[in-house]
Every structure is written in C-alpha cells, then in structure tokens.
Amino acid sequence: MKRSNIASFVALALIASLVSNLFAAEPGPKKKLIELGWDIPTTEYIAEHWREMEENAPFDGIMFDLVATSPEGKQCASQVLFTEDAWEREWFLPCVKNLESCDFQRYRDNFIRIDFYPTPFDWSNDDCWSKVCEKAGICAWVARETNSNICFDFESYGAQMFHHDPKTGRTFAESKALARKRGAEMTAAIVKEKPDAVILCLWMNSINFPAGRADNPDSVLKGFSYGLLPSFIDGMLDAVGPETVLVDGCENGYYMNGAAEYDRAACDMFLATGPAVALVSPENRAKYRAQTQVGFGFYLDMYSNPEGSQYYRGPEPGETRFDRLAANLRAALNASDQYVWVYGEQKRWWAPENPEKEWTSWEEALPGVTELIFELSDLKAALQKQKERVLNDPDKKNLIANGDFANVDANGRPADWGTWQIETSPTGTFVAEDGGAALKNMTNGCYIGSIPAEPGETYFVLAKARIQGESAGGIRVRWNDEKGAWTKVDEDVIVGFDPEAEPDANGDREVFAKAIVPDGAHRLVLLLSASGAGNDGTVIFDDVKVYKASK
C-alpha cells in the first residue's frame, strides 16, 4: 500500500481510543508461572544448582520435595507425608540451610509439595491424623523460614482416600463430617506456623464440577472418587486465617484449548452461581470467594507427545503446535488470578542428579519454550535481553523509512510518515522539530508508518521520545490485511513510555516492543501517538527503528 493512502484508512472509529487506552488499565496482581514435573528437586539439589535452574527455567518459582533423614538413617519426605511415623523439626534444619544459601533472583514463589498419598489408614484414626498434622506443621515451619509456601496434591496415587467407603460402617454424612474435621486440623497446623501461607492445591472443587451442577450434589459426590474432597476443603476454610490464600489449581486446565474454555472454567470456580461455590457450605461461601484464587495446570507433554497419543494437542489451521502452546499458556495465565503451574513428565528443565543419565531438555523438545516462559514471567527483563541481542546484531537493518526524521517535506512535517488526529477535537500540530517528529498540543493523534510483513514473522520496535507538559506518549503496532483493512485488532501491541523511567541526557525515554505478525496480516503499521495535552504538551519521537528477527 502506498504511504499516501495510509491516512485514509487510519481514521476509523476504532482508533479514537488509541492513546487514551494506553495507560487506562490498572495493573493487577503479578501473574506467576510455577514449575512442577518429574524432575522435582530436593533442597540439596536446589542449593547446588539454583543458578543454572533459574537461567534455564525462568519461572517465578518451583515446587520442591522437602526431604530429610532421621538419626536412624530413615528418609522423610513431604511427598510421602501420610505415614504413621513421626518427624522431628531439627531433622529439617539442613533443608532450611540449603534454601537460605540460595540468592534467588527469579524463584521468589516456591512451594513445598505435599502428596496425599496415604498408607491405608482411616479418617477416624486420630493418632495417624495427629502425626500427619504435626508433619504438615513442620512443612509450614520450613516454608516460613525460607519464604516458601505449600502445595497440596490431592490426587489418589494409591488408596482412594477421598472416596466414601460404605464398608467403614459410616454414612456419607458421617464421612463428610470426618473429612471436614481433618481438613480443618491439617490447615490449622499450617496456619499456626505460617498465617499468611499460600496453599496452592493442584485442584480443589474444580475436580467435582459435575456434582456442583447437580440439583443434589451429595447424590453425585457419594459415588465420586473425590466425593469427600469438598468437605475436606470446607474444613480448610474453617481453619484459614485472614491472611491465608487458597488456590484451586484446576488440573483439568491440561485439556483446555482456547481462551473461552479457560475463562469458562474461571467463572465456574469463582462465580457465586458456579459449581465450585455450590460445593462449599453456605457459611463458608463468602470466605471461599474472598480467599480462594483461580489457577490452572498446564501440561507441556500435550505439545511434545506424538500425534495419536491420548495426551496430544495439535495446532489450529495456519499455526504450529508451538503457536497453540503459546496461545493456551497465555490464555491460562490471563484467566487465572495469579498462579499457573506448568507440569512436565517426559522431558526436564534441569539435569538429573545422575549426570550419566540420558535426558532431553524441554527447550530441545519445544524450541522457544524457555523464552516464552521468560516473557510471560517477566516481560520487561525478557525484552531487555532481546533488545541487547538485537542491538548487538551486526546484520540488523532498520526497515522503517526516515526513522531519524532527518527528511522533512515542504509542509515542515517528517517525510514518509502519515498523520492522524481525532476529528472531533483537532487541537494538535504535526511538525518536524528539535531533530524529531513532534506532536504538539494533541488531544489524540499519531504519526503513521508501515512496512510489509508476513504471518509468523517477528519484529522488534525501538524508539525514543521526549514528553513535555501534559502529554502522554506511546507506540501501537497494528496490522493490515492484503486489502489494507485493519485485521487482528485484538493482537495490537501497545507500549507506553514509562513516566518513572530515568530519561537520558537529552531528556529522551526509550521503548522497546516485540510484535509477531498474526495470521492474515500482510503489513505492520506503526503508530507514534500522543494524547491528553489539549493546549499544553508535546511529544517528540526520535530514532525509531524496526528490525526483523532472524530465523
């Protein structure tokens, strides 16, 4: 498309909110990606390898196995907590020292994994449950001392702990009452040691949605494998303190595909009329909704297993399997309140303890997954690393015309750039000034440049701006299809200049953005924008560069 025609298709109603939306959204809680897998480490392993772990697996935190040895040489582990033997707190002091020796830069949200993997004992066995609660308290003590938290994995890998067994002679109501009592006792032991504990459960009531949708949930729960779990969760709610946070990690997130499915599950977990809340006793529902977060599990093997596997997620038309992985992981993170736990089995994030054992990394199996995790976990830091790589590339070529604004047309405006401002309040002036492209006194307007682009290509945008007076400035990357019409507007890339960032000696602030061309787009349109000034403010853009990422 010719540059002279660009302005004619920019002035659509959709653009009127261009800059005013750049800073409108209030930041929510930081979303966090937590690693879990068959490569689950011990504190001893973490102490020896935390640097390379953080480098090769840039999550926000990890789940780990709390392992200690008794004076008699018997191993005790949080993943095998449901045994009749007792623990002593001092056995776990080496675990505390291991974690204290780590200067974590990324792993600030770590979780001790407690498996509900019982040796056969009954809900009514007070002595066994007392020991289990004492051990849960020791885990919470370690969590408090090491700034960690707790993970509950309720899955029955052996005995069906949460299934009502009529052979006990108890009615279902009596079994529910016992389960609620045990949930309260175990949670109270944790809260006593760490009142502000985050207890991330790999699932809570999300495992029992069908029962929550029934007119009589108990009639369904009575025959379910996890039919007593809602009662145990009610007990947890009975015992939580005001600072305690519970997370329903919704392991069924493994199988979800697309934002709509994750959003629906989030509603089912949280809405007052949803099936998860229906399984909570009426007296605990307000507390549940105030102190329980929506989370999701994400199964990496779905995207590396061969086609035909029971656990296989293929691409949508026009995309790769990795595209589908990235889209679904973003959807899970967006639909969560805070936590998504990323689970893997057949590959590893870090080397096994036996260095001679053959292994395959997740990055080898899914090239690009490390950078994806890094971006989703810490976009600012990830983009900074990418920026350094781009600037150090000797073969880089700026694709945007007149990005330094050295060429000026007969009207005193930067050549090769179109302009637009909102028609209902055309207060601004476009002019080449002070070596850059100035937008003076703009209510809402932008300079417009574009380059050809093809789906799947990646581009990096760098720019500087001096912001004066009441103006706000930012950059938006948009897309045109083959006919020059806007397309994939939900995949616009919007970046504002950080008003708190320290300007350079010239008063410039920098911005760096990454843009991946969506399916159906054939032109990248760059909008250098200013808004909010009215009669007092100027934004001057300079040194604009657009680089195409190498393959």
Image (cartoon, rainbow, N blue to C red):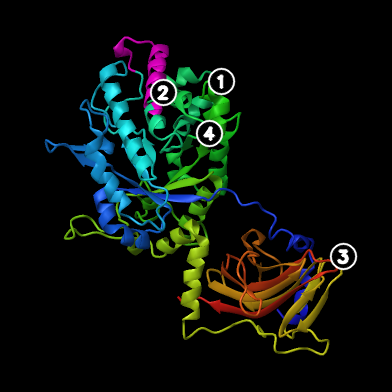
Q: Residue 473 shows which numbered tag?
A: none
Segment colored magenta: 165-188
Which numbered circle lies on residue 425? Answer: 3
- Type of amino acid at the residue the image marks with label 4: Gln
Residue annotated with mark 4: 291
Callout 1: helix, strand or loop? helix
Name the residue rendered at 82%, 71% in the picture.
441
Categorize mark 2 by other alpha carbons within 10 Å: few (<14), some (14-19), many (20+). many
Asked if residue 450 is positioned above or below residue 205 in the image, the reply reads below
**Separation (CA) of disc 4 from disc 1:** 15 Å
Residue 477 lies, in percent from the top left, at 64, 68
Is-magenta flag for residue 167? Answer: yes
Please name the residue that numbered disc 1 is placed on. 282
Residue neighbourhood size for the residue with mark 1, other residues' Cα within 10 Å, grouped as few (<14), some (14–19), many (≥20): few
Labels 1 & 2 near each other (Cβ < 8 A):
no
Q: Main secondary structure of the magenta part?
A: helix
- The answer to whether mark 4 and mark 3 are in CB contact below 8 A is no
Which quadrant would the C terminus be assigned to in this image?
bottom left
Q: Work out how far the residue at label 4 is from the one at label 2, CA to CA, in angstroms.
A: 15 Å
Are circles 4 and 1 on residues that touch, CB within 8 Å?
no
- Tell me if 209 is positioned left or right of 153 in this view: right
